[in-house]
Image: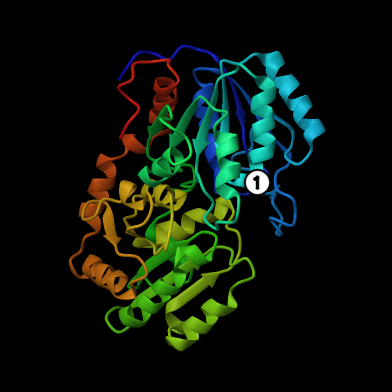
Amino acid sequence: MGKQCKRRKIVMIGPVYPYKTGLSYYVSLLYNQLHNNNEVFLISYTMQYPKFLYRKPQKDYEDDVLKLDDVNYMLHTANPFNWLKVAKYIKKICPDLLILQWMHPYFAPCYYMLAKLVKKIKILYICHNVFPHERFPADKWLTAIALKQADFYITHSNSDAEDLKSIIRNPKMAITVHPAYNFFRRENMSKQKARERLKLSETDKVVLFFGLVREYKGLKHLLNAMAILKEKLQIKLLIAGDFAGNREVYDGLIKKNAIEENVIITDQHIPISEVEKFFAACDLVVLPYESATQSGVIQVAYSFEKPVLATRVGGLPDVVFDGETGYVVEPQNAGKIAEAVIDFYENNRSDEFVKGIEREKYRYSWERMEKVISSLTGNIDKTQNEG
């Protein structure tokens, strides 16, 4: 298991409650884990994204399950004078390590200047997406100028690691799976109770698409697969997530495939208190993505011991083991999605996949994530930083 971690000072920067993103869950859970063995100072934002980049409300004050007490909301990502203040605060703490979350090139000017201002403090970037899903001119350049200021890097997929190597020569890095979001199971809700709440029959076959609906997530391929599946199975598709104003094309596809009776849509951001019923009610979680680096949805599914059907893109095959914890199929192929779903039900694969998920439990733990960070940054033996 390696040596006991030394207690040290760490500054973390990232979104937490009330910001309503999966990344805010990630930062909160990582903070809670690191706080057990280190003195951790958490900085969040007074302004994360400007409204022209993120048009919907960025905060949800009612969804306070992961509310933390010791957060300094002080970083304004678009105000250079504020960056001087934040850098001064960090230097006064004099931490052993500064941990930054990398998710989009928008943050490049802010993080570049912070890194320059804090000078000799060691910096670790946790790269959730090295490059953005929706690419744009200069995104690679912006990413490079920011990330080159760091000393250490963690990615959650091999594909992100390759992207990182394309801009940084021989980075000191670790590749490790995204830890599980294990806090959504609040009532230990049974499948029967969850289906009662969602008005689903106990005899229905139920698959789930969860999360913000964006083009690259390939929901249209799952809807096309449903046209095949409805002829073979008594099946329902739950879609739970915000369509961000782009629902019309999906409604048109549902009508075209005549699957109105087979699809149930909850078009909104799903608060923490409501997540459990969707995962408890389903049999299989489907990620029909056209592109990806990694996805926290898989880790939510595993925390509910739900098998996953994912496409062979980005880092998804790194965490979904075909035939062991679910299925990996070729992207943009409704026929292959339907074939896997049919196999799942006709051959009763659920129990064997659940056993596979159980075998991988420690690999997805936050304890293990802490060991990866400590090993990479030189705090314990380097036997725990891969896998």
Name the residue at the left extreme: 347
Quarter in which the C terminus is drawn: top left
Residue lying at 38% horizontally and 66% vertically, measured from the top left: 207
| Residue sitting farthest toward the right | 81
Q: Is residue 124 visible?
A: yes
| Relative vertical location of residue 74 with respect to residue 233 in this rendering, above or below | above
Please state the total of marks drawn on the protein image: 1
**Residue shown at 52% from the left, 48% from the top:** 131
Q: Is residue 291 above or below residue 64?
A: below
Instruction: Report whether 212 appears left or right of 288.
Output: right
Going by the image, does 357 lie left or right of 271?
A: left
Instruction: Using the image, determine if residue 192 lies above or below residue 235.
Output: above
Is residue 70 something one can see in this rendering? Answer: no
Residue 252, percent across and down?
53, 84
- The residue lying toward the viewer, choosing from 48 and 309, is 48
Q: Position of residue 70 (x, y in %)?
A: 67, 27
Q: Quadrant of the N terminus?
A: top left
Indicate the quadrant where residue 14 lies: top right
The residue at which mark 1 appears reads as 106
| Circle 1 SS class | helix
The quadrant holding residue 201 is bottom left
Amino acid type, callout 1: Tyr
Residue drawn at point x = 46 percent, y = 47 percent: 185
Mark 1 Cα-neighbour bin, 10 Å: few <14, some 14–19, many ≥20? some
Q: Quadrant of residue 349?
A: bottom left
Query: 191 and 162: which one is in front?
Result: 162
Question: Viewed as shown, does residue 37 lie left or right of 191?
Answer: right
Give the residue at x 46% y 76%: 263
Q: Nearer the viewer, residue 169 or 260?
A: 169
Q: Return the x and y of residue 347 as percentages of the image width and height.
A: 17, 66
Q: Residue 326 at what x, y percent from top left?
A: 27, 56
318 to the left or right of 292: left
